[in-house]
Image (spheres, rainbow, N blue to C red):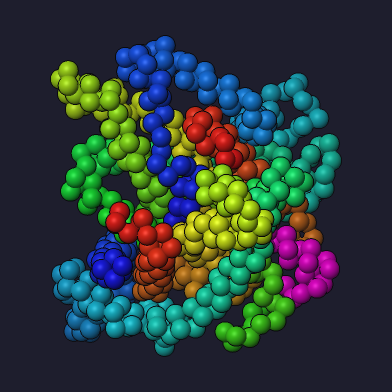
Amino acid sequence: MTTFIIRRVVWTIPVILLVILMTFLMMRQIKGNPFRHTERNVPEAIQKNLERKFHLDRPWYVQYAYYVKGVFTFDLGPSMAQRTRTVNDIVRDGFPRSLKLGLLAYLWAIFLGVPAGILAALRPNSIFDYGAMLFSSIGFALPSFFVATLLIYYVAVKAGLVPTNGWPEGFWQLDKRIILPSFALGLFPMAYFARLVRGAMLETMQQDYVRTAKAKGLRYRRVIGLHVLRNSLIPAVTATAPLLGLIITGTFVIEFIFSIPGIGRYFINSVSNRDYSVVMGITVLTSIIIVTANLFVDIMYGVLDPRTREAR
Amino acid sequence: MAVDRREAALPTAPPAVGAGAAEDSSAGAPIAQASLWRDAWYRYIRNRAAVGAAIIFILMVLYCLIVPGFWKIPGIWTSLKDYDPDAVDFSQAYAGFSLDHPLSTDKFGRDLFARTAVGGQISIAIGFTATLFILAIGVFYGSIAGFIGGKLDNAMMRFLDALYGLPYLPFAIITLAIIGTQNFLAMTIALTVASWFTTSRIVRGQIITLKENDYVRAARAVGARWYRILVRHLLPNTLGVLIIAIFLELPNVVLGEAFLSFIGLGINPPTASWGSMAQDGRDAYRLHPEVLFIPSLAIALLVMCANFIADGLRDALDPRTRETS
């Protein structure tokens, strides 16, 4: 087990380096950089100094090495559009807000999606099952910007129950403004968990060990709780990592609609402002988060299901 | 990114589609193939949800293709006059639902019935083109990795693992920034680049499973060259998963296009796509929600149909999963 974890952790390092390299190489392909020679008359010496300060006079692999060093020392460089701020400042501002939004969305998924899936599986082909699966199909299909606008329109504007936008500042500070954005973001994971858990439960219930458990006279609750649930929630755990990617994509749109100043919003603004250091910093950061999440899920999977350890 | 849905929808070890049929007679014999597809067809049409979804899907595509043409043909559908999706008429702005404008009009008085069709053309075309690219890359990459195997396979899959770390939307946005424009082709490329990994993985898995089949060994034993085994025995048998993959990728691409256009980084407003129309409608959704709702519902309907079709196809082409679902 320990060797499995160590191997898996060590393997993450080249993956992160490769992800940074991909992002770095792609960003280099974008035309235009802030220190390029233009009509604006920058004295030769200043131009040289600027290039030296940002290592632009060095070959690309040296620049890459500097960038990697920056990433691992938590220094993502200066912002190109906002002169007084660094990418670190922007991440420090935006990231906790996005993280909070994403976590709240997960909570919706876990507390509504998983129970819905379990109940649907316990009563297959009942009204409840059909209802849950219809809801899940709709949740899969509706674009989150539509869900968000629908909620704003009916819940905030028409019914006036919650404000249309705004976001409580502190990480632990919660009020009713969080409801709509987190629900709109959480709808897809909710639908996903419901479907996944239902499928896994139905499959587990056909296993021989469940039949054995029933046959030896265990109470229904114990069969479900001990044998079925435990084995069906593994896929839900493994789905967490790829879902994270979707949640990150979702935050971009949801933050845009609800005017939440998280990293997604900064990212979109930075693309429009050609603030490439911020774009790159945020991309690298989210990549590292996804890779790390994959790592944790793999380890969790290894703990929950020992058969997978050898395969890797 | 967006791995989950597609990978979860497919069985973990894609079974050999047609392998069973092919074992009975010689590999790739036309009769065996035909019965496999006919079986699949019968299984599919028994699935009412999937058939309904397929019908709605076809109707939507037809609507997008046919409606924009109608205004050009005098004498047909005369009450649907002036169906120019780009015709601006400020006196008709937000005209509401009427016989002249079955789906109302937007802030420039452009008819939404026609515009939704034109936007749908762009959205669906981007969807299918990008899906096609994804499949092409997937078959290429996946079959090389799966067929050659060994160290190369390992390296190629590790590379994919790393790419899985890249977040979908930022990756697409950066690709768009590299291309520098935001037209049809650029969107297609960006969405392809951001989401080709899953299909590659699926194809590789399929090829590896198929490679172990006896008929491949038999073909090898009688001296078939590697390209003959690949083209004749392996690739045709991946067709089943590829057909499913089309309807698994399509919703992702359509939604991706909509997201990008909605946040203003995709198709830009004068050109209609469902995403850019939704973005247009966002300005005035409090007074005229229908302008936002119509393209959004079109997206949702298309995505939902594609999901149901994918489910139906999976059940039809892979009988083994039927019992549990």
Q: Kindly give the residue lying farthest to the front in the view shown.
A: A216
Q: Quadrant of the C terminus of chain B?
A: top right
Q: Quadrant of residue B69?
A: top right
Residue at 55 percent of width and 49 percent of height? A212
Pick whichever, B71 or A288, lies toward us. A288
Pick whichever, A254 or A304, lies toward us. A304
Pick whichever, A47 or B58, lies toward us. B58
What span is in magenta? A145-164
Residue at 74 percent of width and 22 percent of height? B76
Residue A284 part of the magenta segment: no
Q: Quadrant of the N terminus of chain B?
A: bottom left
Whether residue B14 is visible: yes
B282 lies left or right of B314: right
B300 lies left or right of A264: right
Image position, residue A148 (x, y; %): 67, 62
Image position, residue A47 (x, y; %): 23, 80
Image position, residue A259 (x, y; %): 62, 73
Image position, residue B137 (x, y; %): 33, 41
Residue A155 part of the magenta segment: yes
A174 above or below A160?
A: below
Q: Quadrant of residue B16?
A: top left
Q: Kindly give the residue lying farthest to the top in the view shown.
A: B31
Q: Main secondary structure of the magenta part?
A: helix
Residue at 40 percent of width and 65 percent of height? A303
Residue at 25 percent of width and 42 percent of height? B145
